[in-house]
Amino acid sequence: MFVILVYDVNQKRVAKVLKTARKYLYWVQNSVLEGEITEANFRRLKGELSRIINQDEDSVLFYIFGSMKYSSRELLGIQKGGETNML
């Protein structure tokens, strides 16, 4: 599956969330990561993040795609991170 992760967390937890998410996905912009991930690793990622974030204060969104076959990606401005050969 292909996942786009977007997070908005308290500054105290930003580095931990980014470090954890980068173990599984590619960082593409501030608070945004994406990449192919297995079901098992996706469960691990969600479990690790749920132990880091404060459920009453922080937010992590996952956009989950079964396939990227019918999608495209466009960029305006500078590329900040991630793979250069995505899609």
Image (spheres, helix red, strand yellow):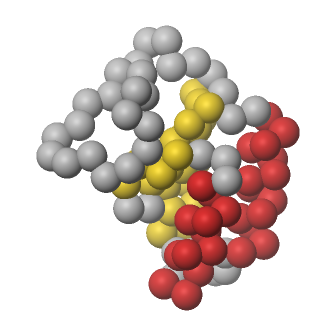
The picture quadrant where one finds residue 47 is bottom right
Q: Is residue 55 visible?
A: no
Q: Position of residue 29 (x, y in %)?
A: 37, 54
Quick check: 83 above or below 72? Answer: below
80 relative position to 5: left or right: left
- Let me know if residue 54 appears in the view: yes
Quadrant in which the C terminus appears: top left
| Residue 43 drawn at (x, y percent) | 81, 47
Picture residue at 79% right of the left edge, 34% below the top? 39
Residue 16: x, y in percent?
Answer: 63, 74
Q: Residue shown at 44%/12% (left/top)?
A: 70
Is residue 57 shown above or below 66? below
**Residue 85 image-quadrant placement:** top left
Viewer-side residue, 70 vs 36: 36
Q: Residue furthest front?
A: 84
Q: Quadrant of the N terminus?
A: top right
Vertical comparison of 54 with 31: above or below: below
44 relative to 56 in the view: left or right: right
